[in-house]
Each structure stands twice: as structure tokens, then as C-alpha cells.
Amino acid sequence: MIYELLAAPTGARVQERSLRSTAVSTVQDGRPNDVQNHAMTTTHSAKDAETRLNELGLVLPAPFQSPTGRPYPFVWIRTRGSRVAISGHLPLNADGSLATEHIGKVGAELTAEDGARAAESVARAVLADLRRELGSLNRVAAWIRVLGMVNVAPGFDRIPQVVNGFSDVILAVFGETIGAHARSAVGVAELPFRVAVEVEAEVEIERAPPK
């Protein structure tokens, strides 16, 4: 396995921004480049997450429809006080079904750019479940950590570039003050349903106002 940890303290933001800008000029289908550009211009923005989401035109998918049709013995989002744990999410279509174009090994059937697109799809799935759980993405006070797992062919080592697809979406929607996160990017031999990317995370939220 290959591990990369990106903690994003204030002094390292310029270096992190440089990494994102060189890592994925990945997605040429109109959406990811917009996300990547937005991720690098939101540091001083006062706009909230829901506003940014709408401006980016990101479509959040319906709840995951498992190909097995069976329930899982866990929850996708677990909230405890101000802490929110996010189970591993997969790339989804708008209707919640698995995105079959994101199935396969990165470095074999899929390129690093394909993998970054898969990671961006995972980000949308995570945001969708967060919004369903919290009522609004504006309740997120800080992104704490991200673990990106990439289904790789032997010898593929551009794993951080793939997971940048996820990070760029988070930074574009939340800005650097809230969206900056510690991160590990890991290459694995296989993932559920042979998807290219799975991501789990943790965020801190503002408590809901008393009724």
C-alpha cells in the first residue's frame, strides 16, 4: 500500500494549492475543471456551502441503491454531538445506482484522470448523504480527515492525484477555512463492486439551534 498524508495547516496552503493545480487538469467534461478552479479561489469567499454548491451546478445523487438489494449492518452517516463520521462512499449516478463508468482498476482499465472523476463522483455522494443527515451543508464547521482508497493495478503510484478529485470538490464547496482537511491516499488491491475509488471522512458540525 502507498500512503500519503496531507494535513493542511495555514502555512502549507500554498503548497497544497500548488499540488492540486498540477495534479489534475484531469477532467475535461466541463464540470471538474470548474470545481478545481473554484477550489483555488474560495479562500476569501464569504459564500456559504449551499450557495457554492448551487453556483457550481453540482448534482447530488439519490441514496445508494446497492446492487445486492440487501440492507447493510451500518449507517452511512453517524452523528455524535458535534462529530460526524462518514462511512466509505462509492461513485454513484444521479439515481443512486453505482456509476459503472467508474468500475475497474486505475492504471489498467482506467487512467488517473478517470480515477479523479470517480473521486469527484464519490464527493457528490458524500455531500448528498451529509445534507440528508444534517438538513443543510452549512452546518459543517470543519472537515477533519479524509481517507481515500483507490483500486489500483500493480505499480500504479499516482494515487494522490486520483484522490485530489475528492479534495477539490470539498474545497470548492466549503472553501479552505472549513474545507481544509488531513488526508491519506491509499492504493488497494480491490474495492467493493470493483469500483475505482472509495472515500470515508469525518467532519465537525455546528450544533442544531435549540427549538
Image: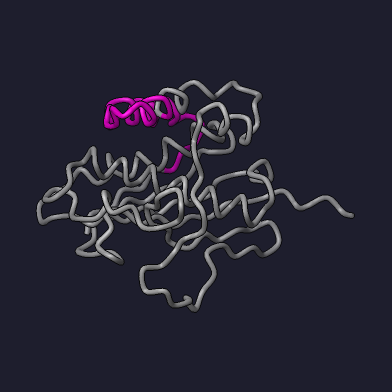
Figure coloring: one colour
Q: Residue furthest right?
A: 211
Membership of 208 in magenta stretch: no
The C terminus: image quadrant: bottom right
Q: Position of residue 148 (x, y in %)?
A: 36, 53
The N terminus: image quadrant: bottom left
In the rendered image, which quarter is residue 151 located in? bottom left
Q: Position of residue 202 (x, y in %)?
A: 53, 55
Q: Position of residue 188 (x, y in %)?
A: 23, 61
Residue displayed at 23% across by 65% down: 190
For residue 173, side relative to residue 197 (left or right): right
Q: Position of residue 168 (x, y in %)?
A: 42, 35
Residue displayed at 40% across by 52% down: 92
Q: Is residue 42 above or below residue 77?
A: above
Number of dots carrying numbers: 0
Residue displayed at 47% across by 24% down: 38
Magenta span: predominant SS is helix
Residue displayed at 30% across by 41% down: 116
Q: Residue furthest front?
A: 95
| Highlighted magenta segment, given as a residue range | 7-35
Membership of 19 in magenta stretch: yes
